[in-house]
Amino acid sequence: MNILCIGGGPAGLYFALLMKQQNPTHRVTVVERNRPFDTFGWGVVLSDQTLANLQAADAPTAALIGDAFNHWDDIEVFFKGRSVRSTGHGFCGIGRKRLLNILQDRCLAVGVELVFETDVADDQALAAEYNADLVIASDGLNSRIRTRYATTYQPDIDLRECRFVWLGTHKKLDAFTFAFEQTEHGWFQAHAYQFDADTSTFIIETPEAVWKAHGLDQMEQPEAIAFCEKLFAKYLDGNALISNATHLRGSANWIRFPRVICNTWVHRETIGGKQVPIVLMGDAAHTAHFSIGSGTKLALEDAIDLANEFATGLPIDEVLQHYEARRSVEVLKIQNAARNSTEWFENVARYAGMPVEQFTYSLLTRSQRISHENLRLRDAAWLEGYEAWLAGGKAAIPPMLTPFTLKGLTLKNRIVVSPMATYSAVEGVPQDFHLVHLGARALGGAALVMVEMTSPTPEGRITPACPGLWNDAQQAAFARIVNFVHGSSTAKIGLQLGHSGPKGSTRVGWEGTDEPLDAGNWPLLAASPLAYGAQNQTPAAMTRADMDRVTAAFVDSARRAVACGFDWLELHCAHGYLLASFLSPATNQRTDAYGGSLENRCRYPLEVLTALRAVWPADKPLSVRISAHDWLPDGNTADDAIAIARLFKAAGADLIDVSSGQTTRDSRPVYGRMYQTPFADRIRNEVGIATMAVGAITEADHANSIIAAGRADLCAIARPHLADPAWTLHAAAQLSPVAAAHTDWPVQYHSGRDQMLREISKQKQLLAQVNQAQAATKNRASEEEG
């Protein structure tokens, strides 16, 4: 093939090198607008994992790069006059210019043609000149080629909130350094690391509002650099900050990071009578914020992946299809992590109230790719010290097993069994199934077991098989369950009260989720007469009389919950149900005092909460579940969730249970592990209220990371508890001997591993009895059906 790479950065050079080595008969040309030694920026960072990928792809080049690297394992965080250092992180720094020169020399050695000082104005004309069979558009962040064929590539470019400047210094740093300095207008942070014998990169970043408040947008480079030198003087030890972009005037060297995502990476043009693919690579195709150091990594790994695909010998169209399909997923993973990292640095003020110990943990795990146990692999001594600090100076305990006190209730750990619809009630009355289901999970080690959404009225049920709490029979059945939990376990039990609203009168889950009943439907209520979906009933808009009647029903159910002995009450204001239909602008089109502004939309749910607060015991927690994001173009966003949480807090909520979506059938959540946790993080640390994280939390490692970082106070876990009622107990056993050695724990956690395993055996015996009861219940049900 004739291969033309437009852009001589890491992506273009490395792909050219690999393809020429793969087949010396290829004619491979790299065209670069700058001279060989012109480059901007300072050092770049690669992880040990990326170095291993380079070694596998091309050992000679990897050796040259490895010899030029400055390697370090430590990260040191400076915050509010204190510092924390941890090790085992495994990074390498190399000057960007040095990296490019190595790649240039290697390309020349294998016969790649390098053409410098050529600014490509017309890629098609250049492709015709070189008779190209393949064009690689590696022309960087501001790719002209991406812009020219934007209709095909469909780029999405998001300018992030912070301004940053990429500087250097001769201050030698023996660790990757994060330094945070507060000014009268807000926070600045430095990302600094040494990349050669006498030079370090020193990136300074701050939110744009803070940048403007200090007048940096009006300063010329020398003045702005002097400002930064003064602000970070304690870390520079008299060394100057240096710019290598002196050709830029004013504040042009302070930029906002552009996050680039392209819908597709391959465009085809007829050039010289043949179809020529024009393939995006590196920053032209995607970007990932420098705070996770992945821009160069992604570029090099793009090149490796596409070269490996060509090595299969498949037709070029299949090669490009496989490359884009596989590589786009890998890039998206990095970009999702980079988004979390970016947002953390954009919101340092959110975490500024934390002590440096937790601030550092939050920073290290900000991307949600580095977990609690991953930190243990890196630096076990540091992590154990942090666990002990988090436990109040006692023995190191896994964070998910630390107690939590809210109002007058203390939970033995941070794990909650989520409320899960089981569609097993009869006339709203919980059955033996509920006793078995909830009782088994109470025996399984979780601190709090939540009953599924329970309606205060018959028409407020989701399905005819959902529970209610509006009569004495229901109250007696729930009291039996509560008494079992209290008498046979150390768990607490909570009730989630909610009204289905526009999502009511539907079939049980296994007959079609949210599908209307075939017969026997009842009328529905909502904020506005908008159906949940095209196939669902259109509800009636609530009148003032309806509101008064439903509020009174909620209050009556809460009084019954008190009589049952429940430890916790939760008001369901999420997932498109009745109260959620008021909160979202997508479902609330009212023109009275209960519609329009966010404050008006919250008015009725707040009335219900206030009424519950008046009858629910002051020493017991009252939480509210919200959809923190509607995942709809015209719905609530995370910013709205902050305002909603503040209003609920002011009205007496003790905790926000943070879910998202399900507002209408059109909701399209962006799923991923712990995907709703960032919403819980924001609410907890911006509003100053306890939160419960929920959603794709499936491992003890997830829960430990969430609790340790202060992203939430509790973790609600559903599916793992369905598969294993003793999930928490088994997780605790796996986390031994640390958990088992802590004598303040209930019996299933203390007196060492042997005692713990004996206790698990007892619990298994109890669960076996429970399962027998469940089987008997099912047999009776089968006989009755027969």
Image (tube, helix red, strand yellow):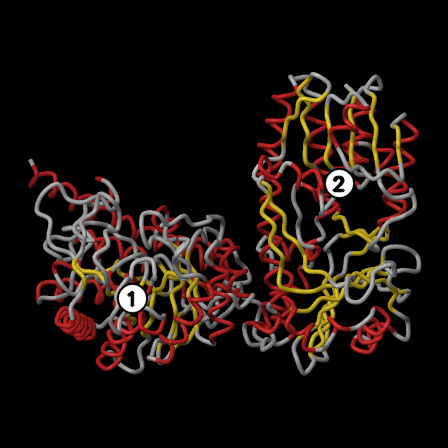
Amino acid beneath label 1: Ile
Q: Percent x, y for residue 142?
A: 71, 47
**Vertical side of 91 occupied by 595: above or below:** below
Q: Is residue 167 above or below residue 766?
A: below
Seen from the viewer's position, the closer of residues 394 and 233 is 233
Residue drawn 46% across the image and 57% down it: 676
| Residue 369 disc label | none
The secondary structure type at the circle numbered 2 is loop
Q: Nearer the viewer, residue 463 or 364?
A: 463
Q: Amino acid at mark 2?
A: Asp
Q: What residue sits right under mark 1 in the picture?
A: 493
Left or right: where does residue 405 sit relative to residue 342? left
Residue 759 visible at all? no
Q: Quadrant of the N terminus?
A: top right
In the picture of the structure, the residue carrying the numbered disc 2 is 139
Q: In this picture, is 252 found above or below 240?
A: above
Given this view, does label 1 or label 2 mark the residue nearer the observer? 2
Q: Position of residue 3 (x, y in %)?
A: 78, 25
Percent position of residue 642, x then y:
44, 70
In terms of image quadrants, where is residue 623? bottom left
Residue at image coords 72%, 60%: 255
Query: In this rendering, is residue 707 above or below 563?
Result: above
